[in-house]
Amino acid sequence: MSACSHESVKEKVNTVGDAAGETAGEFLKGVGSGMDKAFEVKVSSPKYISDKGLEFSKVTINSAGEGMDNMLNVYVIFKKDFSGKLTAKVFDTKEKEVGRVTLQVDGKAEEAKYIDFEFDPRTNIDSDFKIIIE
């Protein structure tokens, strides 16, 4: 009788543990997607960039090691062969330019890769800043 009771309690504890684990997992998933949305970075570029065969996909902001969010990571899809310079400019909420970086970028048609624009360590890119790549 006590073995039956013990198994019943164990089963209930496991059920509660499973439910708590699922709830915690859903909570963390929700926090993660909320953070992604809150820090979603928007990049714009002139039409001639897409005419050259470049498409920008995922964009993130990271720190280059000095504690400031001064690294712009852009996933670039090459629709055509491309070899040239790209300039990333960052504008604050008052439309004032606060950072500029130019990189040599090379890629073949059908390639894709991340490129990193590392700004001055004093540049802190906020999620509501305007970013243009030209």
Image: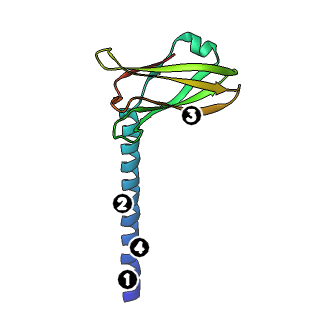
For marks 3 and 4 on the same chain, the one whose residue lies earlier in the sequence = 4
Q: How many marks?
A: 4
Label 2, secondary structure: give it.
helix
Q: Which residue is mark 1?
A: 6
Amino acid type of disc 3? Tyr
Marks 2/1 in contact by CB < 8 Å: the verdict is no
Per the image, the residue denoted by label 2 is 20
Kindly identify the amino acid type of the residue bearing the numbered disc 4.
Glu
Residue that badge 3 annotates? 114
Nearer the N terminus, badge 2 or badge 1?
A: 1
Residue depicted at 66% across the width and 27% down the height? 107
Q: Amino acid at mark 1?
A: His
Q: In this view of the protein, which residue sits in the foreground, 68 or 110? A: 68
Looking at the image, residue 76 sits to the left or right of residue 100; the answer is: right
Q: Residues within 10 Å of mark 2 (few under 14, many from 20)?
A: few
User: Which residue is rendered at x = 37% and y = 71% of the image?
Assistant: 12
